Image: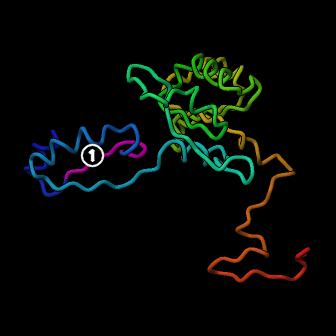
Amino acid sequence: WLVERAQRHQTVIRLQTGDPGLYGALIEMIQPLDAARIAVKVIPGVTSAMASAAAAVETLTLPEVTQTVILTRVEGRTPMPNGESLQELAAHHCTLCLYLSITLLKTVRKELLTAGWRDDCPVLVVQKASWPGEEKILRSTLADIRQCCIEAGITAQAMIIVSPALGARQHRDIKKSRLYDPGFSHRFRKASTAGISHD
């Protein structure tokens, strides 16, 4: 379809949700266009992990809590490569953003528990992040999120985020970013030594 239209029109746009480079079959679409010598440009989109965190006003990283975000999915019809099972990735205890896995929440729980996560760890599910009038945001625990999704009728187009950074907005003892520390230099500001002890 794209090849046929591109041979007749100066510009053809294929618009999709999220970012085409992440679970978007980008290469499968580009190869036939390359073979037909049709010029292609990819415009980056906002992937649902970022849109979901923004919708829920959550951070995916937090100083001295987690500085790593893993974007992955649970094994389903498409197998996972060696070393990329959810259990193996979850063993890092960093932020996990799970795509294409909302119908596999039983497996998510089992894999995370095996990796050492607790049943009371917070879980965020956002369906249709940034879709006006259709977005749903659910917060629960690993033990209860599946039942919450069933009750809310969430069975597709949802991002699952499991992270030690979830809920940080309510924490009063978080470590501050060094970016705004007066004793930290960067290209826009020289460090101030006033009030800083060098003992």
Q: Which residue is mark 1?
A: 14
| Quarter of the picture holding the N terminus | top left
Q: Nearer the viewer, residue 124 or 83?
A: 83
Q: Nearer the viewer, residue 133 or 127?
A: 127
Q: Position of residue 17 (x, y in %)?
A: 40, 42
Secondary structure under the numbered disc 1 in the rendered image? loop
Q: Position of residue 108 (x, y in %)?
A: 59, 22
Q: Which residues are magenta?
A: 12-20
Q: Residues within 10 Å of mark 1 (few under 14, many from 20)?
A: few
Q: Position of residue 65 (x, y in %)?
A: 74, 47
Q: Is residue 100 left or right of residue 16?
A: right
Q: Position of residue 83 (x, y in %)?
A: 49, 30
Q: Establish if 42 lies above or below 145.
A: below
Q: Nearer the viewer, residue 191 or 163?
A: 191
Q: Main secondary structure of the magenta part?
A: loop
User: Which residue is pictured at 24% across the width and 38% down the height?
Assistant: 28
User: Which residue is pictured at 61% across the width and 45% down the height?
Assistant: 53
Magenta run includes residue 14: yes
